[in-house]
């Protein structure tokens, strides 16, 4: 859901000059390429189960479908037969058959609200015949209590790869770049350093990065600005996919 301001879109050379000295990531995001210590020293089951299935969002508005596709592919695992393909984002949209999700994810689409992410994820799991329960954590504010809840949910997710957790957050709070809502997949939680790995689907601009958990909570509770139209006022949180029996 990224869009350049009009003046920068009309004058790309000026935009390049303006951004030439800006760092790729702000101080609250460390690319995984620069810090692999946790992944080398710990099992990190979610990273190994899901990272290979995280693909670039196929439009600038398709972070929701990209993240849901990665989550379901990771939970299902690599297809067993040579003739089986790995499910793509357009294929999942076709299987779900929800015209609204397709329109919101199309180039220039508005993107999804938090409640829609939960609903579309449930429809996608059902369309694939996967027996999954969809639950959510939608904090109202960054408080000591919601910070504790965030850490607890991340620790539960980190314990194994039988569940997947998606995060709806203001991307710029983490990356130091644009101010807008975004969705990606949680890849790991380093409890010792209190940081979380985001498996980015916005791969035109980023690779996976670590961010402190308090920063991620701030990003989840920051309301979407008016420039994003129908999403104005939206806040985020976690949407979790887990086996119904768990």
Image: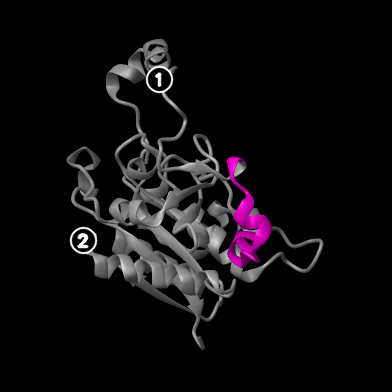
In percent of width and height, residue 234 lies at: 23, 54
Q: Quadrant of residue 135?
A: bottom left
In percent of width and height, residue 177 lies at: 36, 34
Contact between marks 1 and 2 (CB within 8 A): the answer is no
Q: Dominant secondary structure of the magenta stretch? A: helix
Q: Which residues are magenta?
A: 34-50
Q: Is residue 131 magenta?
A: no
Residue at 40% x, 20% y is 19
In percent of width and height, residue 243 lies at: 52, 81
Residue 167 visible in image: yes
In the rendered structure, the answer to whether residue 192 lies left or right of residue 33 reads left
In the rendered structure, the answer to whether residue 89 lies left or right of residue 87 reads left
Find the residue positioned furthest to the bottom: 245
Residue at 44% x, 47% y is 62
In the rendered structure, the answer to whether residue 27 lies left or right of residue 91 reads left
The residue nearer to you, when weighing 197 against 194, is 194
Compared with 14, 33 (above or below) is below
Residue at 34% x, 56% y is 214
Residue for badge 2: 141
Residue at 77% x, 69% y is 80
Mark 1 surroundings: few (<14), some (14-19) or many (≥20) residues within 10 A: few
Distance from Cα at disc 1 to Cα at disc 2? 32 Å
Q: Which label's residue is closer to the chain start, 1 or 2?
A: 1
The residue nearer to you, when weighing 242 against 212, is 212
Q: Quadrant of the N terminus?
A: top left
Q: Is residue 42 magenta?
A: yes
Mark 2 surroundings: few (<14), some (14-19) or many (≥20) residues within 10 A: some
Residue for badge 1: 19
The residue nearer to you, when weighing 96 against 71, is 71
Residue 123 visible in image: no
């Amino acid at each position: 859901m990224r869009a350049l301001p009009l003046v920068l879109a009309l004058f790309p050379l000026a935009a390049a000059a303006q951004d030439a000295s800006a760092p790729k990531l702000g101080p609250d995001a460390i690319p995984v390429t620069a810090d692999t210590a946790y992944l080398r020293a710990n099992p990190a089951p979610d990273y190994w189960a899901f990272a290979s299935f995280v693909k670039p969002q196929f439009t600038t508005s398709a972070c929701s479908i990209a993240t849901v596709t990665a989550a379901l592919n990771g939970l299902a695992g690599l297809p067993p037969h040579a003739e089986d393909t790995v499910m793509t984002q357009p294929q999942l949209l076709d299987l779900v058959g929800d015209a609204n999700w397709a329109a919101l994810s199309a180039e220039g689409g508005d993107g999804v609200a938090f409640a829609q992410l939960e609903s579309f994820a449930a429809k996608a799991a059902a369309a694939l015949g996967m027996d999954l329960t969809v639950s959510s954590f939608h904090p109202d504010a960054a408080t000591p209590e919601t910070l504790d809840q965030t850490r607890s949910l991340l620790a539960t997710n980190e314990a194994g790869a039988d569940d997947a957790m998606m995060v709806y957050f203001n991307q710029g709070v983490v990356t130091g770049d644009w101010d807008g809502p975004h969705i990606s997949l949680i890849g790991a939680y380093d409890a010792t350093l209190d940081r979380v790995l985001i498996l980015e689907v916005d791969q035109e601009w980023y690779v996976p990065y670590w961010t402190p958990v308090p920063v991620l909570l701030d990003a989840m509770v920051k309301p979407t600005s008016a420039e994003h139209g129908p999403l104005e006022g939206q806040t985020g949180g976690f949407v979790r996919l887990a086996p119904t029996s768990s």
